[in-house]
Amino acid sequence: MNIADRIPRNGTKNYTEEMAKKRRDFLTEKTGEPLAHSGQYSIDIDSLKGNVENFFGIVQMPVGVAGPLLINGEHAQGSFYVPLATTEGTLVASYSRGMRVITESGGCKTTVVEQYMQRAPAFIFDDAREAKQFGQWIESNFEHIKAVSETTTSVGKLINIQQWSVSKMRYLRFNYTTGDAAGQNMVGKATLAACEWIVANYPQPTRYLLSGNMDTDKKHSHLNMLNSRGKRVIAEVTIKRQVLQKFMHTDTIAMARACVMANTGAMMAGAAYNGPHSANGIASLFIATGQDEANVVESHAGVLSHELLDNGDLYLSVTLPSLICATYGGGTGLPTQKECLNLMDCYGKGKANKFAEIVAATVLAGDISLGCAVIAGDWVTSHDKYGRNRD
């Protein structure tokens, strides 16, 4: 590579305004783009260590607020104003509309059922029988493996190790709790220590990959639908019939029928989620609050359930079995992201379950609003009115 094509770097002073400007000037010279907006920001560049490399500027994302959203949760209790970062017109208005239905119906109940983060190494042997024997040895030595893995972290706890044999390989799935961090790096480091101990202490020679891809990191999988990756969180609401009629101009009976049709369509398509659009709310909240945006892939999967009650009210619930989110570490401490978390009193240690419940309640609100818009015939007209940038 020609030295003139190398991105400017400085080994000791890479996170400075001087180096950021050098990179902007370099890009302007190479591409002709002046980067007038990307180069304007208020954050301390030195605080970005560990979040980004080759920093040159900030992408400014519009953030709107939806709410109030009334939640009666184990961890989230009260009315919340929810920041949503998006460039999609109508999205914030739609979520606010769904939140009003939930609030006018008495709020939604939220529950964090369980939470794990995984790393899934794969070990290879000479034949299937040796792989089976290895699995038995792992079971017998679990307490030793647990102790070694937990030396790498003050937060992570190894709960169990699932196992599968395929051919002459043995796949292990280490399941940890990770406190208020999402924990992918945490469990990777812990599992590496455990695997090195296993290799050193297992009586026969063995080789391994730290990830055999059964953790399905940043990929959707049916395994994660059944065995939670992140937090399994459920949001429930009983929508009053008169509330839906007043604010959504439709009826609970029509919505229940639409849910049946949508369930069938999603099943035929093999969709990861059978509701209208879980990814929209999750992605917007994730961007606003400094989450790892790639985790939307796993987090959006789930189940929308419904039941038409005898009095005409409609029970709805959203189950998100692999919601991966954090309120501490990663990008959550960056200035604007921290502000958005603080709007919901969700920044810092001890707040991750609260935030997860708000995310699930937000998804439920979005599904109510979009579902009703489709039923009432407002879907296209609302986008025509609010969702077009005519410039």
Image: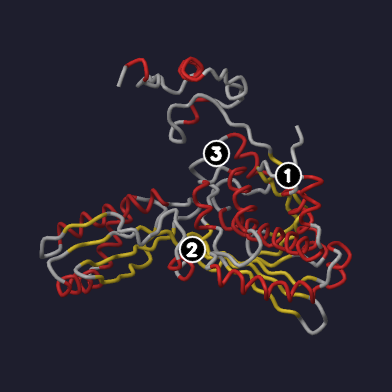
Residue in front for this viewpoint, 15 or 261: 261
Mark 2 sits on what residue?
Answer: 115
Label 1: element kind: loop
Cα separation between marks 1 and 3? 28 Å
The residue located at (17%, 57%) in the rendering is 207
Mark 1 sits on what residue?
Answer: 89
Label 3: element kind: loop
Residue 8 appears in which quarter of the rendering?
A: top left
N-terminal-most mark, 2 or 3: 2
Which part of the image, by quadrant, shows the C terminus?
top right
Camera-near label (1 vs 3) is: 1
N-terminal-most mark, 1 or 3: 1
What's the residue type where badge 3 is placed? Answer: Gly
Q: Is residue 259 left or right of residue 48?
A: right
Measuring from the top left, give residue 319's x and y in whole percent. 59, 67
Q: Is residue 170 left or right of residue 231?
A: left
Q: Which mark is residue 333?
A: 3
What's the residue type where badge 1 is placed? Answer: Gly
N-terminal-most mark, 2 or 1: 1
Measuring from the top left, give residue 140's x and y in whole percent. 23, 72
Number of residue marks: 3
Cα separation between marks 2 and 3? 22 Å
Give the vertical position of 140 relative to 16 (above or below): below
Measuring from the top left, give residue 51's x and y in whole percent. 46, 36
Label 1 packing within 10 angstroms: few (<14), some (14-19), many (20+): some
The residue located at (54%, 62%) in the rendering is 301
